[in-house]
Image (spheres, helix red, strand yellow):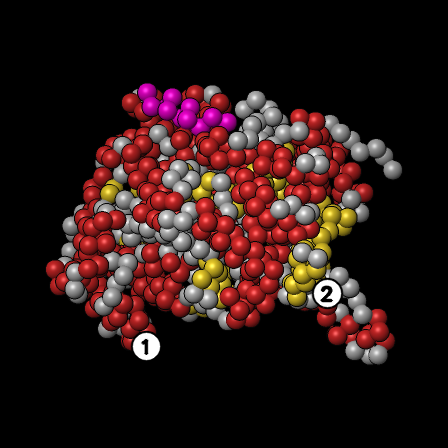
Amino acid sequence: MDDLPRTDLRAAIMWHLTYTLGKDPDHAQLFDWRMALSHAVRDRIVDRWMTATRDTYRADAKRVYYLSMEFLIGRLLEDNIVNLQMTDQARAAIESLGLDYRQLLLDEPDAALGNGGLGRLAACFMESLATLGCPAYGYGIRYEHGLFRQSFLDGRQQEAPEDWLQQPNAWEFERPEARFTLGFGGNILTRAGTTRWEPEHFVQAEAFDTPVIGWRGRWANTLRLWAGRAVNPFDLERFNAGDFAAAAENEALARTISRVLYPEDSTEKGKYLRLMQEYFFSAASIRDILRRFETAHQDLRLLPQKVAIQMNDTHPAIAGPELVRLLHDERGLPFDEALDIARGCLNYTNHTLLPEALESWGEALFASLLPRHLQLIDRIDDAHAKAHPARRVSAHGDGRVRMGELSFIMSNRVNGVAALHTGLMKTTVFRELNDLHPGRIVNETNGVTPRRWVHSCNPRLSALITDTIGDGWIGDLEKLTELEPHIDDADWLARFAQVKTDNKAGLCDWVTREHELMLNPEAIFDVQIKRIHEYKRQHLNILEAIALWQEIRDNPGAGWTPRVKIFGGKAAPGYFFAKDIIRLINDAARVINADAATHGLLQIIYLPNYNVTMAERLIPAADLSEQISTAGKEASGTGNMKFALNGALTIGTLDGANVEIRERVGKENFFLFGMTVDEAEARRQVENHAAGAIAADPRLARAIEAIRAGAFSPDEPDRYAGIVGNLTGPDYFLVASDFSDYWRAQREVDQAYADKRNWARMAALNAARSGWFSSDRTIRGYMADIWGARSLTGN
Ligand code: CR6
């Protein structure tokens, strides 16, 4: 066997094809070539990865542990090639083998280990942590099936399992030796003054490591994902007795834990599994963290100096009581000391104020799985009450265990994800805890990694920026402000506009190929891509489209600016209202797209199975970014940042990070509409607010009436009775009350777009002024304000 070539990439690909994949080049498929390239790239990461680990041990540096139920990493091959700055080399090597480089990249399945913003944020953070040279581990679950695959049948969402792990995953290293056995249920024994938990059931967590390399390949961290394994995977006795299925039952049950992301939680069984998953990955991670600490230190009191743990939302909140349990029950530290140490390490990010999304568990369910933890939570509550007698705020009470309160009480710092959201945390969900702990809540506005979300996904824009100001912006996004003086140069602005035109043409080709629909490339590309939720108000968007359609039909010669409305996003399988919204959009699209009277002026397309890869395709081609949530409901948003960076203008409310985007890009470069948080609150108190708004706006009334009368569902006229009933009745998310102002802002968009040059100017100003929304800036904030961590690469 020839030695593995270290420098010549083409030779390395051939080597891996032969010796790793065992394939003769004559018979190799696209998959084999992709795997061979991935292995060749991975080799170039591994040395740096090991050096980074060694450097961290040598410096005895503080490590950051990011615990997250979700890491929506998407594809990794291109990311890794880009960060190693090997794009030209990789393309040349692949082309010299007679293969298509893009096609090869697209062959990689999307790792859909997340639902939406929270999971994608975790992925951006991992990349920024590596870019900044901050020693860090991401800890999560290696879901066999990530988020479901979405398709439409008669406009309705269908869900199929996502099978990204059907093929071998080139990036991960299985660590059979890194296993922890975790218990559930059972009893608590108190003997000679010490208490111990004797669980009844056991599951093993096995580690799979994926290296995450930063920009320019100077540092790499680890994403460690846990998989469920049985303690006794195979029962030979039962097998020999002929009961083959039962023989493997243990293994099947254990694997269920890491089988799917967010199992249906509307049943008790589902809830039980969900809490098991949370404990499973949190407990395995905490043990791993302690094990690593104890290889270098004896004194557990040093833990907060060496370890910073970030709980991404409340899903890992059980990490708090588990750490206390390990320190107190298993290591024998006094309870108060164990609690202090744990609190010195832990921090919590809140991502939502929506009451239905704030986790809480029934105490019976909780006690059946984690009896000892429930006792410890009571002691934590008591200690808290003793230290803060002014007012009792507890995690356990009224028969429930509230994970938000638990996370807050157990944390050194608690952060919001945008300025507005952080302020609201202090005055709403955590008002009392904030009074007791002034200063604990801090703000770290979200960000996105510019490597993936500009440089890779928008190569034309990236080339123009680099050509104008050099490539320093990729590692220091605030350099984008250096573009500003060029915006007044007509030639430069024309080049900027051409990038968008070319990206739109590329998207049109793809839509024609994949979805057999010809889009009008002259139209405004108006894009709303995100999870489907009433608070995000996709129904406000489709109502406006229906009203526009009606108005164009009435008045076809009025000089309309053509529009293509693009939707993408999945609804939770059990969220029926959201599924109705999807169906309504598809139904309306079918009718409107078929109307010769409005053809070319208004088109609607709902692209199925929205995921990271699709976002990378759509965002660079967007003119208009829809960020239209009811004020006070979207904690931050991160899509909004990606659009602005790629030169789309926002139509949006004063919600989440929209507020900060508007401040930075300038209010004249942002289409604002809708009520503020206070106005929305006041509006809800007005009796029949929706009916009042509908009566005051004939366009809105007509659009709703068309839906009600079955204009888009002639075979089933009352199909949307639920949506209509909500919009005309309670309308908690104030769609009706915000409609008129949304319509007004949309017509301003039409007018502005008609002036191509000025539109390009506004778009360029959005790009030039959005550099602050880099996740590098966000991570620097966490390092300084929350973790007390430092860079080992001097970044
Ligand atoms: N749905 C927020 O709603 C925010 C992300 C990341 C969300 C969204 O506004 O940008 O987190 N919240 O902070 C949760 O997932 C609970 C989200 O993605």
Q: Is residue 227 magenta?
A: no
Asked if residue 556 lies left or right of residue 713, the reply is left
The residue furthest left is: 696
Residue 371: x percent and y percent?
A: 60, 63
Q: Quadrant of residue 193?
A: bottom right
Give the residue type that dot 1 points to: Glu
Q: Position of residue 405 (x, y in %)?
A: 44, 53
Kindly identify the amino acid type of the residue bearing the numbered disc 2.
Glu
Q: Residue at x 27, y 52 (%)?
A: 601
Q: Position of residue 722 (x, y in %)?
A: 31, 71
- What residue is pinned by disc 1? 716
Image quarter for residue 103? Answer: top right
- In what quadrant of the picture does the N terminus appear? top right
Whether residue 467 is visible, yes or no, is yes
Density class for disc 1 (Cα within 10 Å; few <14, some 14-19, many ≥20) is few
Quadrant hosting residue 133: top right
The furthest residue to the right: 1
Q: Viewer-proximal residue, 243 or 162?
A: 243
* Viewer-side residue, 387 vs 751: 387
The quadrant in which the C terminus is found is top right
- Residue of label 2: 251
Please tell me how crowded label 2 is: few (under 14), some (14-19), or many (20+) other residues with Cα within 10 Å: some
- Position above or below: 632 against 788: below
